Amino acid sequence: MKNQNKMRTMKKLRLTFVSGLFLCLLTTSFVSAQNKYETVKVKAPFSMQPIKVFVYPDKDFPITDFGAVPGGDTDNTKAIAAAIEACNQAGGGRVVVPDGIWLTGPVHFKSNVNLHLEENAVLSFTDNPSAYLPAVMTSWEGLECYNYSPLLYAFECENVAITGKGTLKPKMNTWKVWFKRPQPHLNALKELYTKASTDVPVVERQMAEGENHLRPHLIHFNRCKNVLLDGFKIRESPFWTIHIYMCDGGIARNLDVRAHGHNNDGIDLEMTRNFLVEDCVFDQGDDAVVIKAGRNQDAWRLDTPCENIVIRHCKILKGHTLLGIGSEISGGIRNVYMHDCTAPNSVMRLFFVKTNHRRGGFIENIYMKNVTSGSAQRVLEIDTEVLYQWKDLVPTYEERITRINGIHMENVTCDSADAIYELKGCEKLPVKNVSIKNVQVGTVKKFVKRVSHVENVTEKKVRYQKLEQQEK
């Protein structure tokens, strides 16, 4: 009898163990099934892996459920943070911003969160600098530091998105005052540059102090994976508008971006890989699409190139440069392809590769194809000595020359330009292998071309209709 009871007990234990194991396997399958991805294949003149797009769980977290109040007067920072936290804890989904004006401070993302802006929803960001403290780990023009929080910030997140037909619209009164560069601001830049150049730890580079006035980015996604920006509008920005920094994989599409302030680049991809920008409209106070890779010693430390970037079917209504490479390129830039884009009005440069003797790094395999434009100062320019305000502000701690090899422009039309191309390489390390094919310009106002310190320039069917004057 005892033996029979013992056998029954053992049988129950085995069944319990097997049932538990089966339940565990089911749970594991369920969890892994949550992380579903679609893939987007991108054609380019270089090998590029398909881009993963996270399929967000079908769960919504309206910010009104967490106490958000519309109207533009109530601070909804805590309500939005609570909605993001709940969404993240539930395994992901959409944090929904409904129709209306919603005042907020910084929005900090967590993994698997899609901030969804419904049509006619406006996120109105305060311009009170104290709202963006405590400082967070970010960067300023290629130098890492702790600064005011970006208005929308993600750090070391996986699967983060901003989607929908709504609008991001910061208040600008304070930031417009900060656009100026008085002496305290220049002193702060010098301090940050010196600390980065002498390997001071990033945590000791506290820049959100006094009258430093280093403005925050609008969107800054830092060290993230699988980024999606889709469908929304941007109206003005304190600093760089969209900054994708050291990220792996993502898409920016169907965006309507307008920001005409100081340093208002459209989108900056820095030390980022496997990224697609498509079907966007940029109307900028600075460059439109910019590829970067950090500055000097800081980027040499991080050793992370920017690579495998495709920009297609975009319209640039206004901007200094349609496609800018640099000048922060110290980590190296390779495999960039812009095609089938338009700049119907005017830009200073269609395609601008810029660096200087402090940068080092490399630039290789950069392509522009099938582009139409209105007027430009230069259709293509390479300049190896671009220093801006840094020229006299700080010394050269170490000289490193940038290796440039493989710049390609094909099928480009431009109504008028001061010059078709100007290539200014470095005598110590000349630029190599530049190809310019089928470029048509209506009126050339100053000169056709100038080339110095460049090896192997291939020109084919570069034409213009009228030359107004020939500069010596």
Image (cartoon, rainbow, N blue to C red):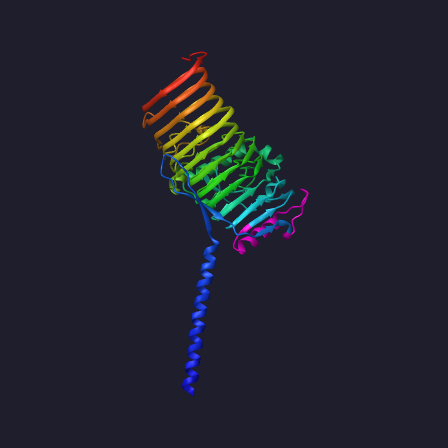
The location of residue 271, given as percent across then percent down, is 42, 40
| Residue 279 is a magenta residue | no
The residue at 47%/38% (across/down) is 192
Q: Is residue 215 visible?
A: yes
Foreground of the two, 471 or 100: 100
Q: Residue at x 45, y 22 (%)?
A: 413
Q: Does 318 appear above or below 34? A: above
Give above or below for 307 relative to 441: below
Q: Is residue 325 visible?
A: no
Choose top left, top right, bottom left or bottom right for residue 367: top left
Seen as rendered, the residue at the extreme top is 469
- 399 or 351, nearer to the observer: 351
Span shown in magenta: 65-93
Total labels drawn: 0
Q: Residue at x 63, y 47 (%)?
A: 76
Of the 4 image quadrants, the one containing the N terminus is bottom left
Q: Indicate whether residue 81 is drawn in magenta.
A: yes
Q: Position of residue 159 (x, y in %)?
A: 48, 48
Q: Residue furthest bottom?
A: 1
Within the image, what quadrant is residue 237 found in? top right
The C terminus, quarter of image: top left
Nearest to the observer: residue 466 or residue 156: 466
Q: Position of residue 256 (x, y in %)?
A: 55, 35
Q: Is 125 or 142 nearer to us in this picture?
A: 125
* Horizontal and vertical percent position of residue 144: 46, 41
